Amino acid sequence: MSDFQCPEGFNEEYLLFQESYEERHYAGSTIVSNNNILHKFLYFLNDENIKSSLDITPSEVTKFPGNYSTAKPKYVSTILYVMRNYLFFLYQQAFTKEDLSKSLPRVRTMRNAFIPYSWNTEDVKKLLGAVDRADPKGKRDYAILLIVVRLGLRVSDLRGLRLSSLNWKRKTISISMQKTKRPLELPLLEDIGWAIIDYLKNGRPQTSSDRVFVRHRAPFDAFGENESFHRELHRYMVKAGLNIPLDVHCGLHSLRSTLARNMLESNATLPVISETLGHQNINTTSLHLKIDLSGLRRCALDPDEVSL
């Protein structure tokens, strides 16, 4: 909703709330995601003939999330989280007379129930092999995919990767992660290095941008915060003849999960995997234990040994 026009009567508090994002050091991608929900809520209020924040009642507060009753629990929880923050902000700033965030229902979700999707080795090879590396755009896409496959870099960090992040002498990639704002240094592996060099020399268009990867349409600038590379990934999956699961989201993040699984199967420790993936909390890394099938088999109990 980049063309969002705030309904009349809500503009002042909306702009103040946007400023609060910066004060709380929200990542750009998080702001975009939260605003998508907030914009829908404000349009909903306008459709309900609510003309100002003072006119909002608990009825509207509970009715809006009810429109998403068939959505996945995790998405509903995100809606409630965004609404709770915004409504509490309105109360703090005296745009409402009562704290309407207390009117929101709570959704119980099983913590860490999600099982990350991961690729098998042959499918990863087919995916990379489907990229036309003679084509300038293909050189870019191949380098991007290889970085995610081999190093597990987040999409947000791929978008923000700068030429100055590449230390060719030390053979390292040094960044400040977009999501956590923490520094991360990864090895500039030989195959990745050659893929980047091929792109920079033979594929990257002339541009003043300091980003490594840029758009291949004029004005050849950096990718926006909404770019997920999902379309490119899907195209190469189809070209490679891969079966695309209908019940899972196969974005670039799934390749990060695949790297985590491969590291687990190679007996890498959780702290090492956590550091590689740039996780703040090792509990996030431990979610990938669910897809370490060989490790889970070693933990399986013999039914005959279980006493009842």
Image: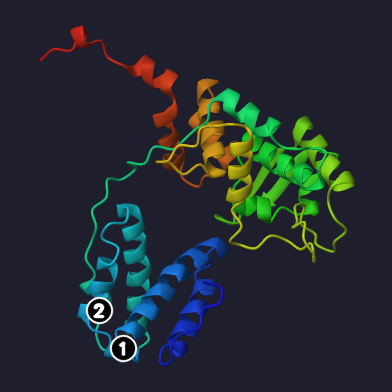
Instruction: Place residue 201 in its image quadrant.
Output: top right
Q: Closer to the camera, 238 or 115?
A: 238
Residue in view at x 51 percent, y 21 percent? 265
Q: Is residue 148 left or right of residue 166?
A: left
Residue kind at label 1, given as amino acid type: Ile
Q: Is residue 212 left or right of residue 48?
A: right
Q: Are marks 1 and 2 in contact (CB under 8 Å)?
A: yes
Q: Which residue is mark 2?
A: 60
The disc label shown at residue 50, or none: 1
Q: Is residue 291 left or right of residue 221?
A: left
Instruction: Place residue 237 in its image quadrant.
Output: top right
Q: Secondary structure at mark 2?
A: helix
Q: Mark 1 or mark 2, which has the lower sequence index?
A: 1
Instruction: Place residue 259 in its image quadrant.
Output: top right
The x, y position of residue 139, in whole percent, is 78, 42
How many residues crowd around disc 1 within 10 Å: few (fewer than 14), some, or many (20 or more)? some
**Location of the C terminus (image quadrant):** top left
- Work out whether 108 lies above or below 259: below
Q: Closer to the camera, 225 or 263?
A: 225
Residue kind at label 2, given as amino acid type: Glu
What is the tally of numbered marks visible in this picture?
Answer: 2
